[in-house]
Amino acid sequence: MSGRSRAVVRWSPWAGLQDKFTMSSSGIPLIGLVDRIRRRIRQLRPSGDIAARIRKRKKVAAAVGKYLDVLRLGLLATGCLWLLALPLSHLQSGTYIDENALQPSQVNTYWDWGDVHRADKFLQDVTSLLDRNLSSAERAVFFATEFAKSGIPSSTQRYSIPTARGVLNGTNAYAIFSAPRTSGTEAVVISASWKSLTGGYNLRGVSTVLSLATFMKHYSHWSKDIIFVISDSHLDGMHAWLSAYHTPTNPNQDVGPLSIASGVIWTALNIDYPGHSFSHLGVFREGLNGRLPNQDLINSFRVISQHTGGVPVLLYDHYEPSEFPGREQIRSFFPTWLPDWIREHEDVMEYGYRAKNILRHFVYQAKGRASGAHGLFHQYRIDAITLFAVPSNGPHGFHALGRTVESTLRTMNNLLERLHASFFFYIITTPSSFLKIGSYLPSVVLVAASLMFGGLGEWVKAGWVEVKDEYMPSEKEKVANATPNSPKKKWIARRRDLLDAFMVVVTSHLAGLSIFVVICGEWLDTTRLAYIITPMCWVTLVLFRFTLRPPPASANAAPLPVLLKAINMCLASTLISVTSVLNFSLAALLAITLGVPLSFSAPSRSLPVCVTKCAVYAVLAFGWLALSGEVTQAIWDWQVLGVWFAPLVCLIYVPFVLQAGVVSGLAP
Amino acid sequence: MTFEFALAVATRTVLAFSPLERLLQDDNQLSSPLTSYSRLQEGVYLFRHGIDPYAGGTFRHSPLSLSFFSTIVPASRIPPALLWTSLDAVGAWALVNIWRSRSNIQRSKRDLRIAAIYLLNPYIFLPCLALSTSTVETTLQLLTLMFASRGQSSLSLLTLAVLSHLSLPAILLLLPVLLLLLSDPLSHLASPKPFPQKLSKCVPLLVEFTVSFVTLALASTLVAGGWGWMRNTWGAGFLLPDLTPNPGLWWYFFTEMFDHFRPFFLAAFSLHLAIYVVPLCIKFQHDPLYASFLLLGILGTFKPYPTLSDPGLFLSFISLFPETYPYLRYPVVTALLHLHAFLLLPLFHHLWIGTGTGNANFFYASTLVFGLANGSALLDYVWAGLRVAIGEEKEGWVVTQE
Amino acid sequence: MRWSILFFFLSWRFSVTAAVEEYREELTLRPLVDGKLAAHFSFSTLLRSAVPRDPSSLGTDDTSQHYTLFPLALGQILREHAIPEFHLTINSGKWDYDRWGHPGEPGVGSGAELWAWMGDGTAVQTSIDARWKALQNSLSGLFCASLGSMDALHTTSPANAFLPTGDLPRLLAPARDAYTLRHATLPAERVCTENLTPFLKLLPCPSRAGIAALLEPHRIFDADWHGLGVHVRWRADRGVQLTLTVQVVLDSVRTSTERRRDWTLESLFGRSLPRSCNVASSSVVLVTLPSDESAYTLSPEPHVSIEGTWSRTSDLNIVMKWPEEERFSYPLNIPPLSDLSVRRTLKGSSQTHGELSVVVRNNRPVPVRTHYLETMPWHVEFFLHTLTVTCGDRGVDCASLLTNMTYTPSRPHATPAQLLATLELPPHETLHLSLRVRKAFLRYTEHPPDAQRGWDLPPAVFVPFDAPHRRIYTPALLVDLATPDFSMPYNVIIMSSTLIALIFGSLFNMLIRRFVVIEVDVKVD
């Protein structure tokens, strides 16, 4: 038999051409050179192994194709498991202070009982303001006058911000203490909002700020202007003040101009002291749209509060498991059906504690919501945190708080540059440990990768279909290449017609847009909306099965569901992986809410399965409308503060789920 | 066809009057220092007040656009928006005409799709909304190739002269345009043959181009009242005085460049841009239109001050070469790369410039992704353009390069 | 008020025969409305009938110099570079015009400011800029200040805003522009002891006797505001006059434990005035009495008469008390004391664009015409076409109030921009100027070591037409410029080049290689 194992047909469309040029190379002499280079390359690589190389490549491709689903699910599972593993202390590293200039708690503080006494006097006045329930304008005038009495130029600012639920009116008071011997180009802000983040009144926070103003005037060691802001309400007042200090961005928000100004604001401390005394100081850090302050600020505050103020530091108001209330909190954090010996176990406790912190962080960051008035500073490149005096029956009060704030300001005062050294992307799990970006980012990226593989797999599936080969080889050829596996299958290419799929995608996004417009207008209660829209959507999805029929018997054209799923998954994967750098919690949320449903969307032959699937997707797409409280809050955030969560859900999450629904609604 | 075309243009007009324009005007992806509209306004303002706009570094537009915008277009908001939209419409019309003369038919169902692909291509219409003058250059490029493929030599050479006067790198298109004028725009990819004409024939055309180019230069010298404009406009492409970020590969390279190596690498980058012309024209001498298409890809990838509209033009040209689609090797990878880049560029720019949490490397990385996307599209089309000639693969046989 | 100023004489000599050199020292103490106290030291040496060197004689040897009181070090600098007039001020702090009024010496812009008028001519060998550079270097050597960094990036020539305060001698060989101005500011420059010590060395009685004895560094540099000034001018009728000034704003409320604004020379400067400086032809302490109605006592009794030669032997310790008030209560609303109130801010937190907004208020009942001078380094570019001028809070457009504007655009990496315009301010009217600016992107070698701090921008200057020497400086600004990663050069070169090489390589690879058709799925047995 002929041992001819490979037949190489060599010919080139250029053959005649080259001769022509090499002969009459008047035109372009380059060809000769090109030929020489080409010959050199041919000597370098004998063409025999090209075929082998291609065969190897094909084998690899085939293997990948065979195990694609395993790979996808493996990636998906790993990603989700990784997310669950985030609270494990093994992934985490201890916090440290990166910027050498900070030198936290290296100064001796001057805040003494006289200042505490003054703060108490201020507290009486502020309380009387509340009792005589003065208008916010009168309050602001009072604060401004108090600042002026201690020799600090002060002023007030009124604002009115329209929302779907009426207009927010208010007045802020602020004062600017220009530090001696400085040109006043940098500034630090100490602020307190009239309302606490607990919803109560922030009387003691306000009096702390007033007393601090009088106190700081008496010292000449400040190297930055210090701006004292007492903002009206909880968030909107501070938003108005900040947007007036920088350029007002939203034209239909009427914020009054500031009559006195200082330089560039670098850092800000927001004081929130709702109770009558406190046991711990909690740190709130999340800003609008998931922006976080530089970690050095938090770390140096922790050091100062523990060493100078003698106050233990908490994340939010979560007690540590080592303390009694903490144990209770964490026990209640776990489901009750867990046996006690598990819930009481130390490692489980630790896991629960960290998981609780991470979860709270995720909720704030994914919703893009500011966890306190400090969160509004971040969008202007100002690093800010809220010091929350956790209400309790003691032992600490104005004395400890004053010392801590003074020392923290002295630390900020040491700064020669903007805070830039430490991390901006991190997840703090306990006051003294955190997750680096490298240790939490992969979880989401893995999910995105699995989606991407799925999409590409679908794309290939759409392009190629495996059919039985009818053609029977003749005897000679059988002898020539005796193949055991005959009749052999063969792959035939299919036409991928993207137009319909794109139409579906565009329509779904338009649907999302219309939903967004509707809920922004707040014409009708979103809960009722949910009850109307979800069934409608369900019916429509099912109806697609009968309306959107693919052209019959198109063996050489890819079916719509496959194409649609391919596009859908690729888009979703791209969005998740891009978002993960910007706002990790949001990306994680998308990874969970999109990754799983989209991976399992597929057309099914049986009608009932299809109907149930459609129902699931309809609920996923519009069920959230039933949480009317959350929706209203999100809309408020969008309209007043410009938080991207609401539009993002409507314009990205809903359309993708809808596309998945269409995929499973259609007939295969 | 005309109706849908009008519809597309109408939607674009509506967009032109949306508040987007204010947001986009100074976006670094959409308008480079050489094409930004606010810089143009600044130059016009200085010119009107008798201050030489070329004395400073703000204004880098050609004196021709200076005189044009200081006399004809008023400063108010409506006329520029209309002008820019109509420029895009003209561009789309030109693209459709190129398709017609390439496929050698009067009208086809494909026309509308081509026009839509151009008008709705975000790379094309976002710069147009930002009133970046790169839209003008795009339209001029399209007109040049349209006239060239219609065989109207003097018109196309004049347009090319204006174009390369406005943005010098476009002069690389001269050779393929000359070849195109001497041959036809029809698709010969499937049957490569040596260039039919004698190359000596392009000498008069070359002379014509040179004359008009020099005339334009002299005219602008008259307008600017001196040669100073050359340093600011053409010189910027070689010396890179303004390091404002853009989607291209130059700016961060020369931000981070050691001072004593700067001249060497500037020279290297400028030469590198010119290297591709002759080889591509030799290899695709049977189809100069395809060669110029590939050169547009080169420009969009390696220009000194690119905007999104430069790669956008290259991508919209793709719709003119359906014969190459079956031979693309990784179109989906290219598409996904472009998708990622398109999302990453504005996001990372915002992280760096706006919120300040990410540093310059973020945006630099996204420009690398963008460069990779453009490069992969370019390479894939070079391959496909060559591969067409071999034809369909037989069962069990593979066409490859040794 | 009748006695608005009281005189305390340490010494006073009538020299009938005018000596060649004359030295006068003077200290003005001014209680301010916000409880602070402004002190203005001025030591002036007059070199009678001396004429500045003519620049055309720079090549040749100079006449020898002999001084008894005039500091030789400074004299040499003046002769060496032929400087008829120059002014150098180094200040720390932000002068609060509204509360403190106009300073005794107008140059109170924060940081260092140097401006000199220099003669040019056809026969002058060394160019103006060379002499300007040399002047900076010699002055920075003399006062231990880093004035040497006032290079072309900072130097401008706003001749209308900084008119010569003295006369300029007629040149032998005048050019078309006989005298030209060079002006530069370093807003980030701080003043400290290392500047004061050489400064005192220039005085005939350095810190032993006379008023200079009060210049005790610890007290001076603990003040809320302090600045040094060196001013040289030539008067045709008198001669070359050198005036060294020290201005201080002290907060006696802050330093006193019971928060009172009483002050004595001891409490302010840590010592009382010892014996007088013998070579001083006059040394005077002036106290401006507060204009408010609060009752105060002043001891000892001042001398208000000028008669004959008189000298003081015992120490002088001026004491001013407000016996009624037990602690100082800050006035709640202070009417602005200056002619103009100016506020200048750079808005917007983006690192690519910003908005420069200037708010000027005319506090006088009469209209005021004033020069408005903006000097910007090249890395902040003006968009002049966005310049808007509005009046009042209603935002009425009144662009007509900003007239004859001259503008020199900045050149990248080279020269600053200079904008000079005339403002017509109606009585008690507020003008809002707003201007969009573009922030440039710098090479990584152009950033300072503390790149994340930002760049200090020089103050804007307002010069009223009717009182050209009552300049008003706005506070300096800080601008954030986007920074590259300073650890990246090699990585960037490597990665970008890799990408380019990848595309280049594979493209040419495709172009030059030959196509082959190969049978692949052959089962080998």
Image (tube, grey):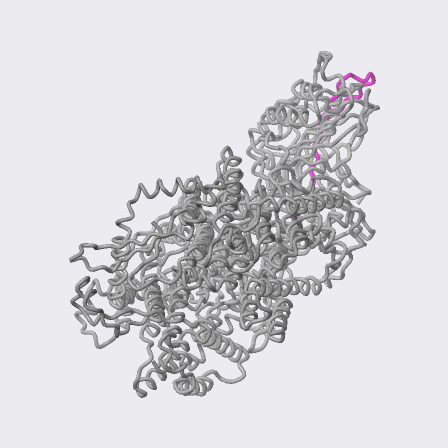
Q: In front: B336, or C279?
A: B336
- Looking at the image, residue A634 sits to the left or right of residue C403; the answer is left
Q: Is residue C16 above or below residue A283?
A: above
Where, quadrant-wise, is the N terminus of chain B in this rendering? Answer: bottom right
x then y, percent, for residue A377: 51, 59
- Tally the numbered discs: 0
x then y, percent, for residue B154: 68, 52
Q: Image point 59% across, 55% down: which residue?
A: B31
Q: Is residue C191 above or below residue A160?
A: above
x then y, percent, for residue A512: 48, 76
x then y, percent, for residue A22: 46, 41
Q: Image point 77% across, 50% down: which residue?
A: B48
| Quarter of the view holding residue C523 | bottom left
- Looking at the image, residue B170 sits to the left or right of residue B190; the answer is right
Whether residue A553 appears in magenta in the rendering, the answer is: no
Q: In front: B230, or A233?
A: B230
Q: In front: C17, or A201?
A: A201
Q: Is residue B37 visible?
A: yes
Q: Is residue C461 visible?
A: no
Q: Which residues are magenta?
A: C10-34
Q: In front: C222, or B102?
A: B102
Q: Image point 39% across, 48% down: which residue?
A: C513
- Looking at the image, residue B324 sits to the left or right of residue C134; the answer is left
| Quarter of the view holding residue A438 | bottom left
Q: Is residue C328 above or below residue A205?
A: above
- Looking at the image, residue A172 sits to the left or right of residue A489; the answer is right
